[in-house]
Protein backbone atom coordinates (compact mmCIF):
# COMPACT_ATOMS: atom_id res chain seq x y z
CA UNK A 1 0.00 0.00 0.00
CA UNK A 2 1.40 3.43 -0.85
CA UNK A 3 2.84 5.22 2.16
CA UNK A 4 2.72 2.12 4.37
CA UNK A 5 5.83 1.48 6.47
CA UNK A 6 6.59 -1.51 8.60
CA UNK A 7 9.54 -1.91 10.91
CA UNK A 8 11.35 -5.18 10.39
CA UNK A 9 14.17 -6.97 12.06
CA UNK A 10 16.84 -8.50 9.92
CA UNK A 11 18.86 -11.37 11.26
CA UNK A 12 21.68 -13.11 9.44
CA UNK A 13 20.71 -16.76 9.22
CA UNK A 14 22.84 -19.46 7.60
CA UNK A 15 21.12 -21.41 4.85
CA UNK A 16 20.18 -24.99 5.69
CA UNK A 17 22.11 -27.80 4.04
CA UNK A 18 20.36 -29.16 0.96
CA UNK A 19 21.78 -31.74 -1.43
CA UNK A 20 20.92 -31.07 -5.05
CA UNK A 21 19.89 -33.74 -7.54
CA UNK A 22 22.76 -35.43 -9.35
CA UNK A 23 22.99 -36.55 -12.95
CA UNK A 24 25.94 -38.88 -13.44
CA UNK A 25 27.26 -40.25 -16.73
CA UNK A 26 27.35 -44.03 -16.30
CA UNK A 27 28.40 -44.85 -19.85
CA UNK A 28 29.08 -43.43 -23.28
CA UNK A 29 29.65 -45.20 -26.58
CA UNK A 30 29.20 -44.95 -30.33
CA UNK A 31 26.44 -47.15 -31.77
CA UNK A 32 25.83 -47.16 -35.52
CA UNK A 33 27.55 -43.80 -35.89
CA UNK A 34 25.41 -42.22 -33.14
CA UNK A 35 26.50 -41.17 -29.63
CA UNK A 36 24.72 -43.12 -26.89
CA UNK A 37 25.02 -41.69 -23.40
CA UNK A 38 23.75 -43.40 -20.23
CA UNK A 39 22.87 -41.25 -17.23
CA UNK A 40 21.73 -41.84 -13.65
CA UNK A 41 19.39 -39.24 -12.11
CA UNK A 42 19.17 -39.22 -8.32
CA UNK A 43 17.54 -36.83 -5.84
CA UNK A 44 19.06 -37.20 -2.35
CA UNK A 45 16.38 -34.85 -0.97
CA UNK A 46 13.52 -36.82 -2.63
CA UNK A 47 12.28 -33.67 -4.34
CA UNK A 48 8.54 -33.29 -4.93
CA UNK A 49 9.29 -32.98 -8.62
CA UNK A 50 12.20 -32.56 -10.99
CA UNK A 51 12.22 -31.01 -14.44
CA UNK A 52 14.86 -32.13 -16.92
CA UNK A 53 15.14 -29.74 -19.85
CA UNK A 54 17.02 -30.48 -23.06
CA UNK A 55 17.74 -27.92 -25.76
CA UNK A 56 15.44 -28.72 -28.68
CA UNK A 57 18.38 -28.60 -31.10
CA UNK A 58 20.44 -31.05 -29.01
CA UNK A 59 20.15 -33.70 -31.71
CA UNK A 60 18.43 -36.31 -29.51
CA UNK A 61 17.16 -39.06 -31.81
CA UNK A 62 16.06 -41.61 -29.19
CA UNK A 63 15.50 -41.68 -25.44
CA UNK A 64 14.54 -44.21 -22.77
CA UNK A 65 14.00 -44.14 -19.03
CA UNK A 66 14.40 -47.28 -16.95
CA UNK A 67 14.22 -49.28 -20.19
CA UNK A 68 10.98 -47.66 -21.44
CA UNK A 69 11.16 -45.62 -24.68
CA UNK A 70 10.28 -41.92 -24.53
CA UNK A 71 9.04 -40.06 -27.61
CA UNK A 72 11.49 -37.39 -28.75
CA UNK A 73 10.27 -33.95 -29.89
CA UNK A 74 10.53 -34.96 -33.55
CA UNK A 75 8.26 -37.97 -32.86
CA UNK A 76 5.62 -36.03 -30.91
CA UNK A 77 2.74 -34.85 -33.03
CA UNK A 78 -0.11 -32.91 -31.46
CA UNK A 79 -3.67 -33.21 -32.68
CA UNK A 80 -5.87 -30.13 -33.09
CA UNK A 81 -7.88 -31.12 -30.02
CA UNK A 82 -4.77 -31.39 -27.84
CA UNK A 83 -3.52 -28.03 -29.09
CA UNK A 84 -6.80 -26.39 -28.11
CA UNK A 85 -6.54 -27.81 -24.59
CA UNK A 86 -3.02 -26.53 -23.90
CA UNK A 87 -2.95 -24.20 -20.92
CA UNK A 88 -1.90 -20.56 -21.16
CA UNK A 89 1.33 -21.40 -19.30
CA UNK A 90 2.32 -24.04 -21.85
CA UNK A 91 1.53 -21.63 -24.68
CA UNK A 92 3.80 -19.08 -23.00
CA UNK A 93 6.54 -21.74 -22.73
CA UNK A 94 6.26 -22.45 -26.47
CA UNK A 95 6.87 -18.82 -27.42
CA UNK A 96 10.17 -18.45 -25.54
CA UNK A 97 13.26 -17.66 -27.57
CA UNK A 98 15.01 -20.67 -26.07
CA UNK A 99 13.05 -23.76 -27.01
CA UNK A 100 13.54 -26.55 -24.47
CA UNK A 101 12.15 -30.08 -24.39
CA UNK A 102 10.96 -30.78 -20.84
CA UNK A 103 10.49 -33.96 -18.82
CA UNK A 104 8.71 -33.52 -15.50
CA UNK A 105 9.21 -36.24 -12.89
CA UNK A 106 6.81 -36.61 -9.97
CA UNK A 107 7.90 -39.07 -7.30
CA UNK A 108 11.32 -40.04 -8.63
CA UNK A 109 12.14 -43.43 -7.05
CA UNK A 110 14.50 -43.28 -4.07
CA UNK A 111 17.11 -45.23 -6.03
CA UNK A 112 16.83 -42.80 -8.97
CA UNK A 113 16.30 -43.41 -12.68
CA UNK A 114 18.42 -44.66 -15.56
CA UNK A 115 18.27 -42.53 -18.71
CA UNK A 116 19.71 -43.48 -22.10
CA UNK A 117 19.91 -40.84 -24.85
CA UNK A 118 20.99 -41.35 -28.45
CA UNK A 119 22.44 -38.20 -30.02
CA UNK A 120 23.89 -37.06 -33.27
CA UNK A 121 27.69 -37.28 -32.98
CA UNK A 122 29.78 -34.19 -32.38
CA UNK A 123 27.06 -32.28 -30.51
CA UNK A 124 27.39 -31.09 -26.93
CA UNK A 125 24.36 -31.98 -24.83
CA UNK A 126 23.15 -29.07 -22.72
CA UNK A 127 20.65 -29.90 -19.98
CA UNK A 128 18.96 -28.03 -17.17
CA UNK A 129 17.76 -29.61 -13.93
CA UNK A 130 15.10 -27.81 -11.90
CA UNK A 131 14.39 -29.47 -8.56
CA UNK A 132 11.37 -28.34 -6.52
CA UNK A 133 10.37 -29.15 -2.94
CA UNK A 134 7.12 -27.57 -1.76
CA UNK A 135 7.62 -25.91 1.58
CA UNK A 136 10.83 -24.67 3.11
CA UNK A 137 13.24 -26.88 5.07
CA UNK A 138 12.39 -27.11 8.77
CA UNK A 139 15.56 -25.23 9.80
CA UNK A 140 15.10 -22.42 7.23
CA UNK A 141 14.04 -18.95 8.36
CA UNK A 142 10.24 -18.88 8.29
CA UNK A 143 8.07 -16.22 6.72
CA UNK A 144 6.47 -13.96 9.39
CA UNK A 145 3.02 -15.21 10.40
CA UNK A 146 1.33 -11.92 9.52
CA UNK A 147 2.60 -11.98 5.94
CA UNK A 148 1.23 -13.75 2.91
CA UNK A 149 3.18 -15.74 0.31
CA UNK A 150 3.38 -14.34 -3.18
CA UNK A 151 0.84 -15.77 -5.61
CA UNK A 152 3.47 -17.83 -7.38
CA UNK A 153 3.71 -21.59 -7.76
CA UNK A 154 7.08 -21.85 -6.03
CA UNK A 155 6.42 -19.40 -3.19
CA UNK A 156 7.72 -20.83 0.09
CA UNK A 157 9.41 -23.67 -1.79
CA UNK A 158 12.99 -24.84 -2.18
CA UNK A 159 14.01 -24.57 -5.84
CA UNK A 160 17.44 -25.55 -7.18
CA UNK A 161 18.51 -24.83 -10.79
CA UNK A 162 21.48 -26.52 -12.41
CA UNK A 163 22.85 -26.37 -15.95
CA UNK A 164 24.95 -29.29 -17.18
CA UNK A 165 26.90 -29.75 -20.39
CA UNK A 166 27.94 -33.22 -21.53
Image (spheres, rainbow, N blue to C red):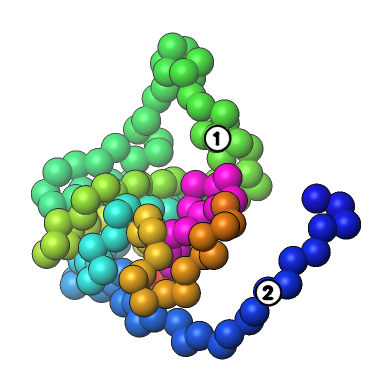
Q: Is residue 55 visible?
A: no
Residue 115, position as x, y percentages in the image: 22, 57
Residue 48, position as x, y percentages in the image: 30, 54
Read off the residue under disc 1: 89
Residue ID at (36%, 69%): 137
Name the chief secondary structure element in magenta. Answer: loop
From the viewer's perspective, tell me whether residue 128 is left or right of residue 151.
left
Residue 51, position as x, y percentages in the image: 38, 53
Residue 134, position as x, y percentages in the image: 37, 55
Pick the front one: 116 or 31: 116
Q: Earlier in the sequence, mark 1 or mark 2?
A: 2
Pick the front one: 72 or 159: 159
Pick the front one: 52 or 138: 138
Which class describes the residues within 10 Å of circle 2: few (<14), some (14-19), or many (20+)? Answer: few
Mark 2: secondary structure: loop
Residue 26 highlighted magenta (yes or no): no
Q: Residue furthest top?
A: 81
Number of callouts in the render?
Answer: 2
From the viewer's perspective, tell me whether residue 74 is left or right of residue 21.
right
Read off the residue under disc 2: 8
Q: Is residue 113 above or below residue 13?
A: above
Residue ID at (42%, 22%): 78
Residue 153 highlighted magenta (yes or no): yes
Q: Is residue 7 above or below residue 59?
A: below
Which quadrant of the structure image shows residue 95? top right
Residue ID at (47%, 87%): 14
Which quadrant of the structure image shows residue 25? bottom left
Mark 1: secondary structure: helix
Which quadrant of the structure image shows residue 42? bottom left
Magenta region: which residues?
149-161
Q: Quadrant of the C terminus?
A: bottom left
Q: Can you tell which of label 1 and label 2 is closer to the viewer?
A: 2
Amino acid sequence: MPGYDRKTKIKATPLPAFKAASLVVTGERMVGGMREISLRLHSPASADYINLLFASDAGITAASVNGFPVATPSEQVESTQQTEQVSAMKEKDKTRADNWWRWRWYGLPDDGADIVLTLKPGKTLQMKIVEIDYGLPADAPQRPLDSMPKPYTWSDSTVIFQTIEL
